[in-house]
Amino acid sequence: MQTKLFNILNVMKNILIIGATGQIGSELTMRLRKEYPNGDIVAGYIPGAEPKGELAESGSSMVVDITNPAQIAEAVDKYRIDTIYNLAALLSAVAEAKPQLAWKIGVGGLYNCLEIAREKGCALFTPSSIGSFGPDTPHTKTPQDTIQRPETIYGVTKVTGEMLSDYYARRFGTDTRSVRFPGLISYVTPPGGGTTDYAVDIYYSAVKGEEFKCPLKPGTFMDMMYMPDALRAAIEIMEADPAKLIHRNSFNIASMSFDPEIIYNKIREYRPDFKMTYELDPLRQKIADSWPDSLDDTCAREEWGWKPEYDLDAMTRDMLLNLEKKLR
């Protein structure tokens, strides 16, 4: 069963971001407000995580708990929402400590979004992750379609989300789309408990002049991406012509792959006195070892024109420059 959603471009105007004060949500909300100045870009948040500063002052916001479908429906009706960005999740390392809550938010919350998107004709973006892969996945240039079988609750919720979103697209014609984010690196919002967070923390240490204690061992390669590229991907996938999308949930997207030694030596090109030692975190190491070293993003490039703008050197220069301003 297909609806007209599959046959026309998704024209975004009024957008609800659930999880708008989180690591991705806070930056995506501001980017969407710049991209769509004539629409209502609504920052959905939970009590205790209210938007502050420019995020609060530059547009609409309201309490939208993803586990409360009535709140989601109320926001969609009140602001005539046509597109929902579902960014509510517990990140990998945090989720392992709270697996029941991770499932409630990651799968129960997604189901609430899917039902409301189905009922009200909204498009829905729900990010997946490199965490959706597991130890049996080919680790180098991981294909778009391959065995996944993750061993973390975070990964299990992401694979479930991919399949459930595709089911709603096939069964009900709901316009669901997503990308598998690599580790995301940003100077704006502090990291929130992910396995790839070391690649953010290392820049903070470099700018503060502190020795960095790396929680992962040398040779631990993971795909990473600078936040401006990630935000652009989240917008471009929703603007893509659906007639060209063979896949929907979820596209591999890639930018750069490195291990701790590579990023450390890159930073030392600009901070020669910077020092790093290793203080391994067994949980994070186990999770990282089960994830791909690098992703093959050919399908995203061919189906909707994905192309990253930042490599490791460009990101490093920008991170150091902006953190210097931020930490003065």
Image (cartoon, rainbow, N blue to C red):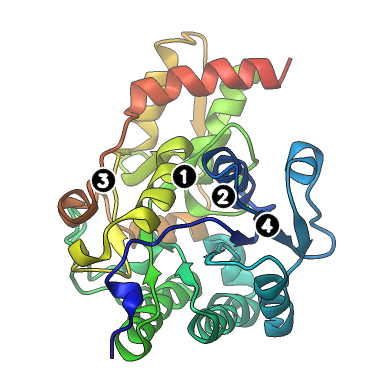
Mark 3 Cα-neighbour bin, 10 Å: few <14, some 14–19, many ≥20: many
Alpha-carbon span between mark 2 and mark 1: 8 Å
Task: Give yes or no for contact between labels 2 and 1 (Cβ–Cβ under 8 Å).
Answer: yes
Q: Is residue 36 above or below residue 120?
A: above
Quadrant placement of the C terminus: top right
Mark 3 — residue? 306
Mark 1 — residue? 231
Quadrant placement of the N terminus: bottom left
Mark before the other along the chain sequence, 2 or 1:
2
Alpha-carbon span between mark 3 and mark 2: 19 Å
Which residue of the protein is positioned furthest toward the right in this rendering? 48
Mark 2 — residue? 24
Foreground label between 2 and 1 = 1
Mark 4 Cα-neighbour bin, 10 Å: few <14, some 14–19, many ≥20: many
Mark 4 — residue? 42
The amino acid marked with disc number 1 is Leu
Q: Position of residue 213 (x, y in %)?
A: 56, 34
* Mark 4, secondary structure of its residue: strand
The amino acid marked with disc number 3 is Trp
Q: Position of residue 310 (x, y in %)?
A: 35, 29
Residue 70 falls left or right of residue 120: right
Q: Is residue 71 above or below residue 297?
A: below
Alpha-carbon span between mark 4 and mark 1: 16 Å
Q: Quadrant of residue 203?
A: top right
Mark before the other along the chain sequence, 3 or 2:
2
Q: Is residue 266 above or below residue 104?
A: above
Foreground label between 2 and 4 = 4
